[in-house]
Amino acid sequence: LPHSGNDGDGQPEEEEKPTIVELAEEALLDVCVGDGFVMLGVASQEVQKRLPASNTRFSKQWFQGQHKSFELKKILNDEWRVRLTDSAKVRANARLDEREARGKRLRELIVAEQVFPNLSADRLPRTLCSREVAALLCILPMLAQRGAHVPSGLPSALLERL
C-alpha cells in the first residue's frame, strides 16, 4: 500500500505520536461547551481515559503547569474548572484536521494504485478530479520503483489534466 508521505528514500514517514499535553488538549476540546470551562474532575477523567497506561496524575497542579494549554478558574469554595487556552484550541483542531486529511490522502492513494493498471495516456476517465490526478502522480515513482510498467505518455497526460 502507498504511504501518505515519505522521507525521500521510499520509506514510510513516521507519524509523530501525540504528547500527553496534546492528548489532554484534544480530550478537553471534546468536552468543553459554553464558556469552555469544565469541572477539573471531569477534565482529569477525560484525559485519563485517553491515557490509561499513564502514571500521570491529572491534578490542578498538572493543569496549572501547562499554562500555555490550560486556564484554571476557581468557582465557589474549592471547586476548580479548567478550559483550553485559545492557542491550544487552534493547535488541537489543527491536529485533528491533519489526521482526517492524512486518512483521506491515504484512501486516495490506495484507490489510485487500484485503478492505475487500467490507465494509459489515451485512456484517462474524464471524471478524474484534481485530487485523484494528484494521487495518481504521487504513486508513479513508487510503482516504477517496484518495476511496474508505466505507460508511455501517462505522466504527462496526468500533468495536463491538473
Image (cartoon, rainbow, N blue to C red):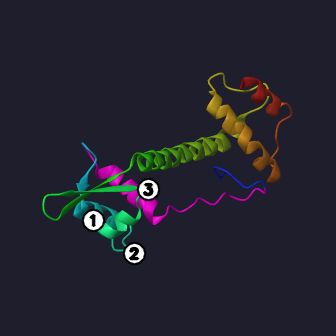
Question: Badge 1: how crowded within 10 Å, few (<14), some, or many (20+)?
Answer: few
Q: Residue at x 41, y 62 (%)?
A: 66
The Cα–Cα distance between marks 2 and 3, rounded to whole angstroms, is 24 Å
The tag on residue 53 is 2
**Quick check: is 30 in the magenta stretch?**
yes
Magenta extent: 9-33
Question: Badge 3: how crowded within 10 Å, few (<14), some, or many (20+)?
Answer: few
Q: Residue at x 29, y 65 (%)?
A: 44
**Quick check: is 118 in the magenta stretch?**
no
Residue closest to the far right: 152
Residue closest to the far top: 126
Residue closest to the far left: 77
Reading the image, the residue beneath label 1 is: 45
Q: Considering only vertical position in the picture, is 55 above or below 73?
A: below
Reading the image, the residue beneath label 3 is: 68
The kind of residue tagged 2 is Ala
Say which label, 1 or 3, has the lower sequence index. Answer: 1
Front disc: 1 or 3: 3
Front disc: 1 or 2: 1
